[in-house]
Image: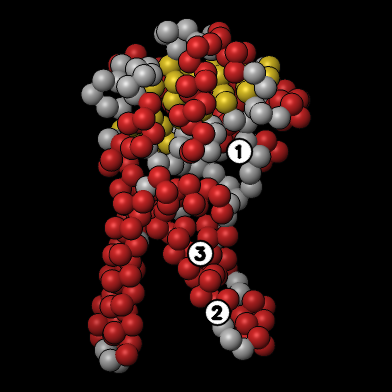
Amino acid sequence: MGTTVGIVGLGLIGGSLGLDLRSQGYRVIGVSRKRQTCQTAVLRKVADEASIHLSQLATAEVIFICTPIRAIAPTIAALLPHLSPEAIVTDVGSVKTPIVEAIMPWCPNFLGGHPMAGTESQGIDAAQRNLFVNTPYVLTPVESTSTRAIAQLEEIIGAIGARLYFCSPQQHDRAVAWISHLPLLASAGLIESCLGEEEEEVLQLAQQFAGSGFRDTSRVGGGNPELGVEIARSNREEILRSLSRYRQNLDGLITAIEQEDWQKLAAILQHTESERKKFVARSC
């Protein structure tokens, strides 16, 4: 294919992107803050070459910014002087509106993106092939986004086997608040609630008894705390909206049980049983 792709941030997402793109014939140049990560990236064939210097990306035609959310805009600002005016820049942040609004005025070739794939592990050593196969990859163009940027990223996302979706940055943030950010915080709340058990022996029994149900519902709440805070800060309005609705539904469950309204409780559980497949059918 001949396209040279730059990746800034060689963790799980950036590293996995590199592995897949190189396997599809793209030339990959990686950038990381750590020399050791750069060396590992080349050894693991994540990148053809890797450096701690953004200037190494001067020949890149498409650049993926795979840094933490707070670092995306400053990284692009530092990167732009080294790039061709034709270079396309995208990111992989899980919040889009503040990023797109901050960057588009001074980086017209930017197109917000969010690959919705991952694992519990982080870092270059967690990078794996085919991480994105059959997973959603969202692009959030705005009115001023160039059609060339959209076409180029559409081709790359197709090459890694992801399912491509388009929506506005605002629609993305509202939808992701429901199915990613709310579960993260609800999961954290579950763990905190369990830890509130006052009888130590009962708490220890609960920890010993915990199986797949608790493991599945608590997984995202036991993830990276720094990432959770960044997400809450960046998507505050939509997260508060989803948490408020969640609290209303918890109150409804409490009321049904307090009033021994088993018919109402059954109706709620029957409804959730039938509707869940609309959210998870593609991932099962």
Q: Nearer the viewer, residue 256 or 106?
A: 106
Instruction: Relative to 66, say whether 182 is above or below.
Output: below
- Quarter-wise, where is residue 168 in the image? top left
In the rendered image, which residue does mark 3 sit on?
A: 188
- Residue 262, percent from left and from top: 29, 88
Residue drawn at x 53%, y 38% is 68
Q: Which residue is mark 1?
A: 12
Residue 57 vertical position relative to residue 251 in the rendered view, above or below: above
Q: Which residue lies under the disc numbered 2?
A: 196
Q: Is residue 70 visible?
A: yes
**Label 3 close to label 2 by CB (< 8 Å):** no
**Drawn side of residue 87 relative to residue 123, left or right:** left
x and y, in percent, of residue 217 in the image: 50, 65
In the rendered view, does 28 fall on the left or right side of 146?
Answer: right
Task: Give yes or no for contact between labels 1 and 3 (Cβ–Cβ under 8 Å).
Answer: no
**Could you say which is closer to the camera, residue 88 or residue 54?**
54
Residue 55 lies in quadrant = top right
Q: Secondary structure at mark 1?
A: helix
Q: Is residue 153 left or right of residue 171?
A: right
Q: Earlier in the sequence, mark 2 or mark 1?
A: 1
> Who is closer to the viewer here, 262 or 55?
55
